[in-house]
Image: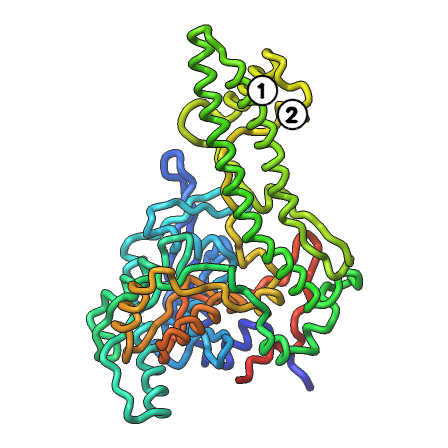
Amino acid sequence: MIFQLNEEQYNWIVNGGDIINEDVYVDDVSKRGSRNVANLTYSQGAGYNKGNKSSADMVKTGLMDNGNGSSTYEVPLKGGLVSYNITDINGTEVMHYFKRKFERQQTEINIQGERYELDMEDAEWERFKSTFLSKVSAVVQYRVQQFKQHNPDIEFNQVSIYPVPSSSNFNVMMAKQISGVDMINGLPTRQINTEILKKNTNKLEKDQDFIEKNKEYYDSQRFQNNSNGGTHLQGVENDMNKLSRYADINQQIEHTNEIVEKLLTRYYTLNNQMRQGNVSPKTLESLAELYYEYQNSVKSITKVSEWYDVIAQKTRNQRLEKIAKALKYTKGPSVEERSGAIYNILKQYKMLNGFNTTNTTEVCRWEPVNFQIKKMGNDVRMALKNYFQPNEDAEMVKNEVEKAMGTVIVVFDDNVSGGATLSDICLQLQNLGLEFVIPITFGRMRTSYNQGRNIIINKPENGFNYRT
């Protein structure tokens, strides 16, 4: 006879019933003046999550609460490493609440079609934070014991906390909380400057070793119910071909901004001349030429983005909004008013003849759209390496690394799903000579294999092969 267990039942058996009823979840909703408020509670062994208003969005804390350093929500990483995750995250908004808490930003959640502002009593937060920090300390103690089993002569003098670079301040603030603990495993703590590593795709490349270990998967069909989507490896090659254009795209954006600076200078000069009733034909001609050059330069941003699609076997261009962002909120008149004014001046003085110009082009500065790892499929993310590189300030990196030598390195991140970014961070730190790395995150998140609307990427049947 075969019994099928769901994840909750499985965890109950494996972990001795520790995690079934210990979570952070919404236990109450109320009206506070004009605000709809959803209250977060931190339940420790108080029975099932009675009255949970949003079971699809919560943070499981059962393994955090048991205090055992060897018991975490583990995710394998490259290089034989394991990420030790203190909680298990279901949904996103409760996690966002914790991420935004340090920056005093609000987080809203949808409950039965209504929007609520998440809130947590200070006493609840302090209790949660205290348990969290105790669990981090227990994990470090457990891993240090393992390090010493393999190398009995090793002696550590400190625990160094490295917050993974992030667009939010959460990792840095949590690293401060961790390093604020007087002692971890009897060792003093300090924080490593997060700036020693920077996201930099200039040296991004395929991880041939990882791909070879998972060759059967990467040679198989990528999408469910879509044989025209190519293989996983072809998906990797296509994304690499797009990314290889970023240097030229950035260079073209810089060139476009140089032109727009000249164009705006001519426009302001001409405005002064018009107020004084003394318009220079030379200034008008220069404005028209720069306007035409600017329009062509903006179009060239997409032209230099051309990449080769190995599945369709043809070249493609990336859409402008995917690779460049117009900076609309600059000083002076609005971009729309300024753009229309320049066009109307040229039209008024009949300076558009011979130029393929329109009044739809916004005259503004541009910046590259930041490369976002999370927008790629997990199969592609795992097949690449060198997302991060040491900071160009080599002296600062050298000083930070020297201070961290001979210490336990706790790499702290807000969450882990597939593990591509965290793997890369840890390997880059090891390349700098920081050997004893312990990756710890706030929580594990589900790995998404969705690639746009109704497009599902096939998962590796038995997970990825991480053998070293």
Give the residue type that dot 1 points to. Answer: Tyr
Left or right side of 419 for 194: left
Q: Which mark is residue 438?
A: none
| Spatial CA span between label 2 and label 1 | 8 Å
Circle 2 residue: 357
User: Relative to residue 233, is residue 249 depicted above or below?
Assistant: above
* Picture coordinates of residue 394, whole percent (x, y): 33, 64
Left or right side of 400 for 266: right
Front residue (pair 14, 3):
14
Q: Who's the residue at 40% across and 39% down the image?
A: 31
**Location of residue 18 (image quadrant):** bottom left
Front residue (pair 288, 332):
288
Disc nearer the start of the sequence (2/1): 1
Circle 1 residue: 343
Identify the coloring.
Answer: rainbow
Number of numbered discs: 2
Proximity of marks 2 and 1: CB atoms separated by less than 8 Å:
yes
Q: Is residue 194 visible?
A: no
- Classify the position of the N terminus by image quarter: bottom right
User: Relative to residue 288, is residue 40 depicted above or below?
Assistant: below
Q: Badge 2: few (under 14), some or many (20 or more) residues near its Cα, within 10 Å?
A: some
Give the residue type that dot 2 points to. Answer: Thr
Label 2 SS: loop
Label 1 SS: helix
* Picture coordinates of residue 210, whole percent (x, y): 59, 76
* Picture coordinates of residue 98, whole percent (x, y): 38, 55
